[in-house]
Image (tube, helix red, strand yellow):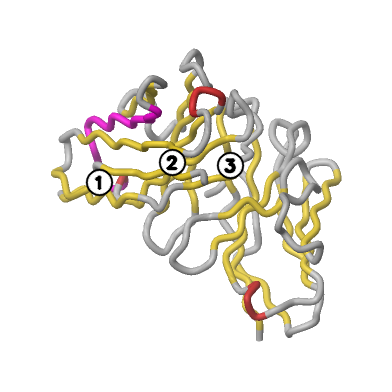
Amino acid sequence: QVQLVESGGGVVQAGKSLRLSCVGSGFTFNQFGMHWVRQTPGKGLEWVAVTWYDGSNKYYADSVKGRFAISRDNSKDTLYLQMNSLRAEDTAVYYCARDRDSSGYLVELDYWGQGTLVTVSS
Amino acid sequence: QSVLTQTPSASGTPGQRVTISCSGSSSNIGSKYVYWYQQLPGTAPKLLIYRDNRRPSGVPDRFSGSKSGTSASLAISGLRSEDEAHYYCAAWDDSLRGVVFGGGTKLTVL
């Protein structure tokens, strides 16, 4: 069965960096676009970034542009989110999600991980 | 302030039909597919409606989606207690070159 498992969350000081990972299994990882979506506890969903199936295109929310970088290693079935210059407002549960489309334009997020909590302390 | 606008809350009694709306613009809903996600308490979101009005396998036909112009709606008929959840609309936005979510609607089954 399809599974997405995130890791790498934790408590980090403002201004520091953190890298999240998301390992996919049960499907052909290199055929799907992959997204990161975050959710502040008790608040709504906020899209963070997307990478196409082959990593050729990447798009970011304005709130993280220039600070976060999405990447993937299809040989390891793994998605990454490198987060630099972290701010208190980046505190959230970060989900990785598979897009049924190879690009990610369609926003058909059919499988989600369980989420990993990132807490940025000031 | 979300790019897609949803009313924060909705409610209904068991068996009733409720509608949740999502308002956007020409750069998102007006030209792109709309998606609806259901998030039960303490769980990850689940794809409920895709490409405006299609249901993934396993989603009951009590759930339906529609779109007109720059607005979209999610209708839930035969409301059940297990439908109590947050519902989010989403779409690609050509101007922002990214995905936009609505602020979410908390549905309460009275």
Q: Quadrant of residue A42?
A: bottom left
Please, what secondary structure does the residue beneath circle 1 have? loop
Residue named by callout 3 = A109
Q: Which tag, 1 or 3, sits closer to the chain's start?
A: 1
Where residue B98 appears, x then y in whole percent? 56, 30
- The correct choice, above or below, for B88 with respect to B26 in the image is below
Where residue B22 appears, x then y in whole percent? 71, 53
Chain of the residue under the numbered disc 2 shown in the image: A
What amino acid is labelled 3 in the image?
Leu
Do circles 1 and 2 both sit on a common chain? yes
Local packing at callout 3 (Cα closer than 10 Å; few below 14, some 14-19, many 20+) is: many
What amino acid is labelled 2 in the image?
Cys
Residue named by callout 1 = A9
Local packing at callout 2 (Cα closer than 10 Å; few below 14, some 14-19, many 20+) is: many
- The correct choice, above or below, for B86 with respect to A67 in the image is below
- The correct choice, above or below, for A113 with respect to A34 in the image is below
Rounded to the nearest angstrom, the CA distance separating label 1 from label 3 is: 21 Å
Q: Is residue B68 left or right of residue A75?
A: right
Location of the C terminus of chain B (image quadrant) = bottom right
Q: Is residue B27 left or right of residue B87?
A: right
Q: Which tag, 2 or 3, sits closer to the chain's start?
A: 2
Q: Residue at x 29, y 37 (%)?
A: A20
Provide the residue span drawn in magenta. A77-89
What amino acid is labelled 1 in the image?
Gly
Q: Quadrant of residue A5?
A: top left
Q: Which mark is residue A96?
A: 2
In terms of depth relative to the viewer, which is nearer, A23 or B42?
A23
